[in-house]
């Protein structure tokens, strides 16, 4: 993959309620600096999947144009975060005979291609093939084997795939914008790259990205991604519950959720009254007056349902012990009052709200958990060399034996 032009990269997070575009400049060893931001209400997306192609294209164009004007730079290609799934997460093993030769970049590419080829036999579209660890002649826990010697090299790759139809529809919408796609990235993976600190990557942590139409899960341990999953529930479902339960419009339901909503009941909820405009009524006097406790009683069951699904998915993947007791919440719904405390109670883990920490130039309004996935795409672009590249599977024979080093040197230099 060719490097970004002028060190400038574009990121596009296409969610069910919001489409965000970041343009950033990669400054070598420094943190990337955001030079353009655009965001737009999302139309034509439901639970991370395209439902109206033309509406999605218009929303993407609106966000991209706003970011381009701010950055004074025209985007040709972007990294795209996909939140729709369902994601399929698995670990594959690939082995390669070294015959005493030194491990080189070409050997790692062959191992990664071998692992991707093994995963390509499913009906899913491959998104990621992330090295979890290497071993040489049975010696495990090797993070980077290049320059080492041995008889046999083994790699464990964590492979993330998704249903092909939603991905292709999403890609088609971006291409009609018109933009080329540098890489599709699972949204919870991107959000983790933007918000987790180094100790959380190494010691184990679960990232829960509570978006509008979906909730993504990404688990990290020993500095590597070890699991990705998704749930077709999010903050928009809470908004819809409020609209139905209080017979108001979706716009007023979203406003009440943001200003007065909470995932946990408070002692004064019965005394605080909220005006609820009714559907079809234009006069303010026609609004209902309900206690805040009525709003909380609608929000809490749905929030508990989302978190219980997260807990069940982690238990089904047998990751509860592996990733430790740390959870980071991202996504726009993570800002819902009381959600952090409810998550601690349901998941029985330590929970914090995650905000982008690896970018410069973010304003306060775009530096919150709702923009974690977009920020993570920029971090992904800067750290892409750490993930397995996925070129076309090579059938080229690999020379081994005493002349292996000479043959490799000739091939790589001429």
Image (cartoon, rainbow, N blue to C red):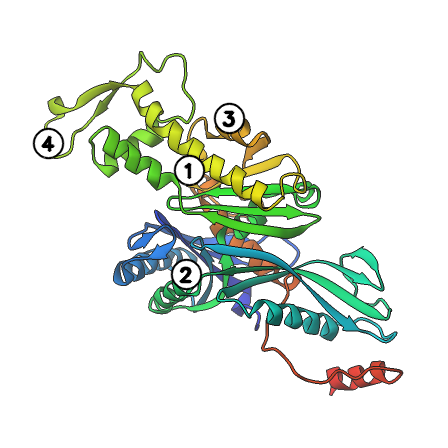
The answer to whether marks 1 and 2 mark residues whose Cβ atoms lie closer than 8 Å is: no
Alpha carbon separation for disc pair 3 and 1: 14 Å
Q: Is residue 120 left or right of residue 86?
A: right
Alpha carbon separation for disc pair 2 and 4: 43 Å
* Disc on res. 333: 1
The answer to whether marks 3 and 1 mark residues whose Cβ atoms lie closer than 8 Å is: no
Which residue does the numbered mark 3 point to in the structure image?
A: 341
Tell me which corner region of the image, top left, top right, bottom left or bottom right, holds residue 241. top left
The answer to whether marks 1 and 4 mark residues whose Cβ atoms lie closer than 8 Å is: no
Q: Position of residue 95 (x, y in %)?
A: 74, 69
* Front of the two marks 1 and 4: 1
Q: Which comes sooner in the sequence, label 2 or label 4?
A: 2
Secondary structure of the residue carrying tag 1 is: helix
Q: Position of residue 7 (x, y in %)?
A: 55, 64
Instruction: Identify whether 207 is placed above or below 153.
Output: above
Q: Which comes sooner in the sequence, label 1 or label 2?
A: 2
Question: What residue sits 29% from the left and 62% below the top?
Answer: 53
Q: Is residue 44 left or right of residue 350?
A: left
Q: Position of residue 63 (x, y in %)?
A: 35, 55
Q: Which comes sooner in the sequence, label 1 or label 4?
A: 4
Q: Is residue 172 visible?
A: yes
Count of labels in the image: 4
Question: What residue sits 80% from the left and 82% below the top?
Answer: 409
Q: Residues within 10 Å of mark 1 (few under 14, many from 20)?
A: many
Which residue does the numbered mark 4 point to in the structure image?
A: 282
């Amino acid at each position: 993959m060719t490097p970004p032009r002028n060190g400038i990269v574009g990121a596009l997070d296409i969610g069910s309620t919001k489409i965000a575009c970041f343009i950033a400049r990669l400054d070598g060893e420094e943190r990337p600096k955001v030079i353009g931001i655009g965001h737009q209400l999302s139309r034509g997306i439901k639970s991370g999947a395209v439902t109206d192609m033309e509406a999605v294209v218009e929303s993407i164009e609106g966000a991209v144009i706003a970011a381009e004007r701010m950055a004074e730079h025209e985007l040709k290609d972007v990294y795209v975060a996909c939140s729709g799934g369902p994601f399929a997460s698995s670990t594959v093993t690939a082995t390669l005979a070294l015959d005493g030769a030194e491990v080189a970049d070409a050997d790692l590419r062959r191992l990664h291609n071998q692992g991707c080829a093994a995963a390509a036999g499913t009906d899913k579209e491959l998104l990621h093939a992330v090295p979890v660890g290497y071993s040489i002649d049975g010696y495990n826990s090797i993070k980077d084997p290049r320059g080492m010697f041995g008889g046999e090299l083994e790699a464990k790759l964590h492979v993330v795939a998704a249903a092909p139809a939603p991905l292709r529809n999403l890609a088609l919408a971006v291409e009609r914008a018109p933009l080329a796609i540098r890489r599709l990235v699972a949204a919870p993976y991107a959000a983790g790259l933007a918000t987790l600190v180094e100790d959380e990557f190494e010691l184990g942590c679960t990232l829960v990205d509570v978006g509008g139409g979906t909730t993504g899960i990404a688990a990290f341990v020993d500095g590597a991604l070890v699991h990705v999953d998704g749930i077709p529930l999010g903050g928009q479902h809470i908004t819809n519950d409020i609209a139905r339960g209080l017979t108001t419009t979706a716009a007023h339901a979203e406003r009440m959720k943001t200003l007065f909503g909470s995932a946990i009941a408070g002692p004064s909820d019965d005394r605080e009254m909220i005006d609820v405009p009714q559907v079809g009524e234009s006069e303010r006097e026609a609004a209902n007056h309900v206690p805040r406790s009525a709003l909380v009683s609608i929000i809490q069951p749905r929030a508990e349902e989302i978190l219980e699904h997260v807990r069940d998915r982690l238990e089904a993947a047998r990751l509860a012990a592996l990733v430790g007791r740390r959870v980071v919440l991202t996504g726009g719904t993570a800002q819902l009052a009381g959600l952090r405390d409810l998550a601690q109670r349901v998941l029985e883990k330590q929970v914090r709200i995650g905000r982008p920490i690896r970018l410069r130039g973010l304003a306060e309004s775009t530096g919150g958990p709702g923009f974690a996935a977009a920020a993570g795409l920029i971090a992904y672009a800067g750290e892409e060399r750490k993930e397995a590249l996925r070129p076309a599977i090579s059938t080229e024979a690999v020379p081994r034996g005493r002349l292996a080093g000479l043959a490799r040197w000739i091939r790589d230099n001429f």
